[in-house]
Amino acid sequence: MIEIRFHGRGGQGAVTAAEILAKAAFKDGKYAQAFPFFGVERRGAPVMAFTRIDDEPIRIRYQVYNPNYVLVLDDGLTHVVDVFSGLKDNGKIIVNTDEDFKNGGDTEVYEIDATKIALDTLGINIVNTIILGYFAKKTGEVSIESIIEVIKEVFPGKIGEKNATATMKAYEMA
Amino acid sequence: MTKEVMTANKAVAEAARLVKPKVIPVFPITPQTSISEYLAQYVADGDIDAKYVKVESEHSAISAAVGASGAGVRVFTATSSQGLMLMHEIIFAAAGMRVPIVMANANRAISAPLSIWNDQQDSIAQRDAGWLQTYVEDAQDALDSTLMAYKISENDDVLLPSMVCLDGFILTHTVEPVDIPNQEDVNKFLPSYNPKHSFLDPKEPMTLGALADPGYYFEARHAIEIGMEKSIDVIKKTCKEFEEIFGRKYDLVENYKCDDAEIVLVAMGSVCSTIKAVIDELREEGEKIGLLKIRVYRPFPVDEINDAIKNCKKLSILDKNITFGIGGALYSDIKAKINKETYGFIIGLGGRDITPDTIKEVYEKTKNPEKDVTWVGLKKEDD
Amino acid sequence: MVSTGCVIKDPGNSKKNKTGSWRTFKPVLDKEKCIGCDKCVMFCPDAAINKDHDINYDYCKGCGICSAECPVKAIEMIKE
């Protein structure tokens, strides 16, 4: 089983990203589960969401404490919460940032300027789908085809098309 | 049949769509809200031919449900926590009037202190109302139990309302794969509701909810007891019919590796999934441990419990509720009805996360018991 | 440990929760353009703008309502 933790802010779509990833993994023929950190959602407040992916049906139902991957939608969060908390030894972290992201140990850190892609393509700083494109390429845990398919299902019409384009950009950049 | 990734709330709404209710009076409350939103959408889109009643409170929601069901149509509603508390008065009336309402309850803690997070105190507090109560383990169970609840409640031998209880957030807000049955199969399983004891017909006027003096009340309450007793067989039969059409097996209880277990954990709802994973892990280390899942809590399946636990030495009961001074409600029911060395554990109140360590602590404390009832997961004094 | 009845005995403790860290975009006021209409003061959901139109960045969540409401476009939202 692999476990993924998303860090975002209320309104940035971390919960939707976790659900899109679960739905895409299911399309790939795997079992998946996604859920938010059960809090009171407020725009801007630090939020977390989780996805579990496995070849077997997933039974466990508690929060993810030791993720294989951490996806950070907003680098400002790294000053507010410990995004490395509980990350597995060989775990990887993907951060949306336009800076060199400093980390304490030898954890593999990937940086992507998803905000730039979002502003260029969508005209708004929402990076939740974009970071999934990058995740798909860097980790191979989910197919980009399924991610794109689910994005178009979740956001029908033009918004879906634009999100798909932005997500493909991130995939190709990775 | 299609398979989709969805929350248990969506699964419940899908079930409500498939049973074709005529009236849906519902008031939104976290973590039930998305059920009421999906249903509003379905009605607006014409996917359900029903009257969606936008009531001003939960007391009105259940009152409208009783009225509509008394008028002879199929009704669905849903609530949670404080909403269920506000319904309390009419919850009893619904059972007494023998209206086969089905209601989903997203299990959430009770104030004060205010909490939106999961435990099962809300529906447990209604256990004596005369409703049937099912505690579901996952989103699929939520959908299937809602379908079955109508068939059971509407049975002439039962005619009691049903509450389908799903753990708030842990199920209501978690997406996972769910099979959505097709309409033809559901129609075959659950024909349209044909009321026999209460319906609105000007040619055949009747009074519902009248006063009963001491010459009648006692028998009326006893009749509920008989309905509750008879529902056991109706539930079993319904589960069999469900399995024949949809292929998924359900029962009043689920025996998970109890037959050779020395210690059997007894629990309800979503925590059973995590317990099963822990049992598999402990069994690999040679521990003789099993789980008895109480899926149907009312009627209380005494014979089924006795049958499943006959070989074990000790029982540990996990309760997400507290009857102060006694222990959990399930613990006290089991102590009353089952003759076995039994220990009670209070877990997960107000959304305290239940991890494998919680379950292992319960197991260890049952092996080496110190007291009858233990709260597992409390913070230390200096935390 | 929790107090009896979860009573909170130090009122005003929401001040301890500096929500400025939630911000992605920061409102910056051009006082040259400002006509002193006080709309931003009234609309700010966090009371983070005082009568002198100083923005308190300890609590401003960067919601942008002030910028949207300003009739002379004197408040610009700038990425942190």
Image (spheres, rainbow, N blue to C red):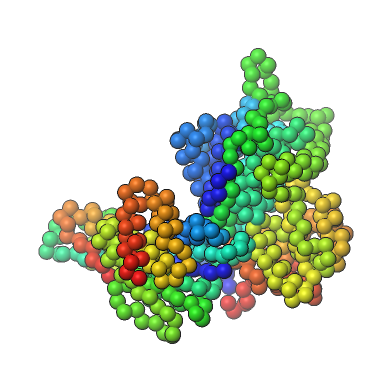
> Which residue sits at x=29%, y=76%?
A99
> Which residue sits at x=50%, y=35%?
B47
> Which residue sits at x=68%, y=16%?
B204
Q: Is residue A96 above or below residue B145?
A: below
- Lateral position of residue B174 relative to residue A97, left or right: right
Q: Position of residue B197 (x, y in %)?
A: 72, 26
Q: Position of residue B250 (x, y in %)?
A: 72, 49
Q: Position of residue C1 (x, y in %)?
A: 58, 73
> Which quarter of the figure is the N terminus of chain A placed in?
bottom right
- Lateral position of residue A132 relative to residue B33, left or right: left
Q: Identify which residue, A31 or B35, lies in the foreground.
A: A31
Q: What number of labels is visible?
A: 0
> Which quarter of the figure is the C terminus of chain A placed in?
bottom left
- Lateral position of residue B41 relative to residue B8, left or right: left
> Which residue sits at x=25%, y=61%?
A120
User: Picture quarter containing residue A164?
Assistant: bottom left
Q: Is residue A126 visible?
A: yes
Q: Is residue B148 visible?
A: no
